[in-house]
Amino acid sequence: MRILFHPSVEDVTVEAVLHALSDPVRVAIFAQIAGSACKQTCSDFLVVREQVVPKSTLSQHFKVLREAGLIRSERHGVEMRSTSRCSEIEKRFPGLIPSIVRALKIQSGEKTSAQSPLRQRRT
């Protein structure tokens, strides 16, 4: 079994965090993990943003989030359980994650109202 790489908090970079959160599926995964009081498994994310996500793709998304320092994953039998490292990131880059989360909420609110007419045209 391969050992999972988790960078030390000192090795986490803003660029890696921003890159990891540049994908809509990864943002959704991270937001759910960060907002949860308990560990999340990969199978909790088989459907993300109303889209089915293959397990191989999920594995890649979790790897990117883990290697960026945003989550910590542990193997429990055949399951991978992940938790956020928000408190560690907050100490290294105060306000970074809350600012990104706020911006995403604003963006999703804007997109929701802006997408309604487009969805109607497509159907």
Image (cartoon, grey):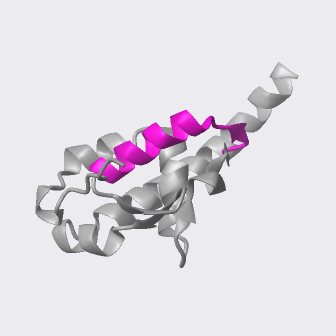
- Judged from this view, the residue extending furthest toward the bottom is 37
Whether 102 is drawn above or below 22: the answer is below
- Judged from this view, the residue extending furthest toward the top is 122
Query: Would residue 68 appear left or right of 113 to someone viewing this image?
Result: left
Give the main secondary structure of the magenta stretch: helix
Q: Please provide percent x and percent y for residue 33.
A: 51, 64
Regarding residue 9, the answer to whether it shows in the image is yes
**Of the pair 5 and 66, the residue shown nearer to us:** 5
Q: How many marks?
A: 0
Q: Please provide percent x and percent y for residue 7.
A: 20, 56
Q: Please provide percent x and percent y for residue 3.
A: 29, 52
The residues colored magenta run 48-67
Query: Would residue 8 appear left or right of 34 to someone viewing this image?
Result: left
Q: Residue at x 18, y 55 (%)?
A: 12
Whether 72 is drawn above or below 67: the answer is below
Q: Based on the displayed image, in which of its 4 quarters is residue 84 positioned?
A: bottom left
Query: Would residue 54 appear left or right of 99 to someone viewing this image?
Result: right
Q: Is 58 part of what is drawn in magenta?
A: yes
- Judged from this view, the residue extending furthest toward the left is 10
Q: Based on the displayed image, in which of its 4 quarters is residue 63 positioned?
A: top left
Q: Residue at x 26, y 67 (%)?
A: 89
**Of the pair 59 and 2, the residue shown nearer to us:** 2
Regarding residue 109, the answer to whether it shows in the image is no
Which quarter of the figure is the C terminus placed in? top right
Q: Is 8 part of what is drawn in magenta?
A: no
